[in-house]
Amino acid sequence: MANLSTISASENKTGMNANFQGSLGTPMNLRAVSALGAKEVFAFRLDMASELLTDLEAEAHLIHSLLACAKAEVRLAESRQTQARRRVQFLSRLCETSSQSMDTAKVQYAEVKAQAAKEGVDEVSDDDDPQNELVSVTLD
């Protein structure tokens, strides 16, 4: 970005003096500028101001682009959050259904075991007991 340099012009007994404050902050006495006259000095200042304005417009455009990117990131994060909620809801329903299926299987097992006892079958394998099964659920 361009630094706006400052020029001050004044007229005294010996003629026009111009002092130029450079972009590095070093003051310089420019006799050549005094020869140009005030009109050229102000034209130079106008040119410098125009460059600064151009730089500021470019910076504003960059900031606008960054804002658009940030808004897009927010929309993406909201979308991911919505997807995560849907996954959680799906897995919750799946766990509930699985739990209900497990309860049903336990009831059926108890009924079969009771029926076997009525018919005189003393030995029922515990390998078929649903409580002996390992159930592992991993949520990502």
Image (cartoon, rainbow, N blue to C red):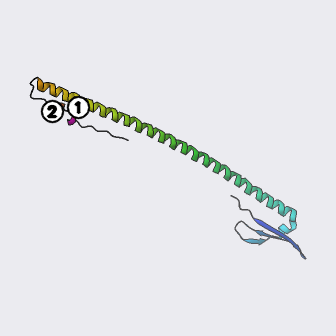
Residue 88: give its label. none
Which of 31 and 106 lies nearest the eye of the viewer?
106
Amino acid type of the residue that numbered disc 2 sits on in the rendered structure: Asp
SS at circle 2: helix
Magenta part, dominant SS: loop
Instruction: Indicate the secondary structure of the residue bearing disc 1.
Output: helix
Mark carried by residue 106: 1
Q: Position of residue 38 (x, y in %)?
A: 87, 65
For image coordinates 83% across by 59% down, the residue present is 43
Q: Nearer the viewer, mark 1 or mark 2?
A: 1
**Label 1 vs label 2: CA separation?**
13 Å
Task: Please say whether residue 30 is one of the residues in the magenta stretch.
Answer: no
Considering the image in quadrants, where does the C terminus appear? Answer: top left
Q: Residues within 10 Å of mark 2 (few under 14, many from 20)?
A: few
Which residue: 48% across, 39% down? 82
- Magenta range is 131-140
Height in image: 74 above or below 124?
below
- Whether the residues at callouts 1 and 2 have beta carbons within 8 Å, the answer is no
**Which residue is drawn at the image coordinates 35% and 33% (left, top)?**
94
In the figure, is residue 65 to the left or right of 73?
right
Question: Does residue 125 appear in this view?
Answer: yes
In the picture, the disc for residue 126 is 2
Q: In the image, residue 78 lies at what x, y percent?
A: 51, 42
Mark toward the start of the polypeptide (1 vs 2): 1
Query: In the image, residue 132 lies at what x, y percent?
Result: 20, 36
